[in-house]
Amino acid sequence: MLAGLTLLQAFVILFQGKYLAEALVNSWEQKSLQTIIYPMILFAMAFVLRHLFNLLNTKIVEHYASQTSEEIRSQLLDKIYNAGPEMISEEGTGNLVTSSLDGIDLVENYFKLIFTKLMNMSIIPPVLLVYIYMQNIASGITLTIIVPLVILFMIILGLAAQSKADAQYQQYTILSNHFLDALRGLPTLKMLGLSKRYAKNIYTVSDEYRRRTMNTLRIAILSTFALDWLTTLGIAILAVFLGLGLINNSFPLFPALVTLILAPEYFLPLRDFSNDYHATLNGKNALNSIFEILERPITKDTDALDDFTWNENSTFSIKNLQFSYKGVGTSDVSLDIDQIKLSGYQKIGVIGKSGSGKTTLIRTIGGFIVPNQSEITINNQSVENFKQLHWQKQLTFLPQSPYLFSGSIADNIAFYRPTAPLEDIKKAAVSAGLQDFIATLDDGYQTQIGEGGRGISGGQQQRIMLARAFLADDRRILIFDEPTAHLDIETEYALKKPMEKLFKNHLVIFATHRLHWIKEMDYVIVMNNGQIAEQGTPQELANHNGAYSQLIANMRGDQL
């Protein structure tokens, strides 16, 4: 439909130039008024039809762009939902948010511009050029020679602009992830007294994005100027050629005039495409980025594990687990685990210095990250990864920064059991030590809290997370990823008693860097550079001067 309307538009532009030239020639030759009015009426009709076809083209493309971009957004969100945290870990939250929101808007703008401009450039100039050849062969040859020069400059400057735009969009992605990470880590930076110092880092990243944007705009403005100069020069050369021909009486006035009127229309689609090409580069980059996400393979066989309930006789083992990917920043994330075997209601401590792989191991066991290769056995059943529906139904995950949703406190406690009655929610809140805090609130359990837990202190957020775990007591595996890392020591000790109560009759996997938690563990895994340096009971590991003893000494400050 778009191609058909564009073809009609090309002929209307042709008629517009033809009848305008005819009216001007008749006026110049002082013919009767009727011979001037009739072509002008036809010119006016062609003018109206041209803009009507242009309006229809715009409506068609806008509808298609809106519909298609929303379809792509739906596919992207489905992909992210199905892939889960493994994609977020690799791509970065900021990148996915940027792609889903700003990226789709850029794609929609790209569709609105690129299809109309490409169709105009492909259809209108050839139709006009054929007519110009019919009127004056020399003029047609002149325009034919100029177009390749214009296209050559478009390609050269377009490639330069695209290179700059690619770098600029990549920097935009980095800035999105960086800003989101900085926003999330602001309480920690403030607690450590580093918030003002970190402001300089944010300024540096933002200024780099500004510099790249200006470089891209510089190329875009230069290419627009060069293209305008070339097309204007081409029309000027044609005008001089036609003027000399008229002076020498080598051809009539009408062919010269209609050629001169149609020449700007001949170059207009090229100029429009070039001008809008730079406006579409970010949309093209966003579309490529989204396609890369959509083409990522999704982990299969997530329902390979039979339904089960973890109890004191249950076991799982890991052998030859390897995992690596390029981190969101510049660092690589990797794991290389020879063997881990856990069973029953053990309390397992995972310790190691920062960056040793504790969180990666925790997320792998939780099924949030899928290893590149592994031999995993759960209750004597072999599976390829921990991203199994029945395995994850047994898990309660308590991360460093608990995420609370916009809604009531009761809704947030009932995260794992949305249909839980209020009485059960209250019992879970009492077990987590929330009752005194909730009693001070006017609306009690129906008190609304903001997205991400706004309006709730860090300690109370962690208690709500504990209440979730108490309410979902049928989930017998607890995974803690340094849940008290961002809390002061007094708040942590206040939470320790309800957490120890929660440990009973559960398999507990607890990543921490706090010494007092290690004493509560039955078994300890010491991580170093993505590998297990040592594992065993705390007593066994303390009996020889290995990685465990050295790490404990460093944590106590005995060694520098």
Image (spheres, grey):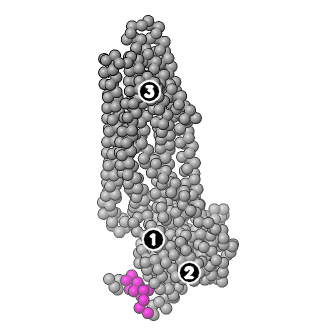
Query: Which element is circle 3 on?
Result: helix
Marks 1 and 2 close (CB-CB < 8 Å)? no
- Stretch of the chain drawn in magenta: 544-555
Quadrant (top left, top right, bottom left, bottom right) of the N terminus? top right
Q: Amino acid at mark 3?
A: Tyr
Query: Which element is circle 2 on?
Result: strand
Which of these two is toward me, 62 or 540? Answer: 62
Report the mark closest to the observer, 1 or 3.
3
Pick whichever of labels 1 and 3 is earlier in the sequence: 3
Marks 1 and 3 close (CB-CB < 8 Å)? no
Pick whichever of labels 1 and 2 is earlier in the sequence: 2
**In the rendering, at what x and y percent does residue 301 appear?**
64, 68
Report the residue marked by disc 2.
319
Report the mark closest to the observer, 2 or 3.
3
Crowdedness of circle 1 by 10 Å Cα count: few (<14), some, many (20+)?
some
Query: Which element is circle 1 on?
Result: strand
Q: Residue at x 43, y 64 (%)?
A: 328
Q: Residue at x 50, y 48 (%)?
A: 104
Label 1 – label 2 distance at C-alpha:
19 Å
Q: Quadrant of residue 533?
A: bottom left
**In the rendering, at what x and y percent does residue 427 appear?**
61, 69
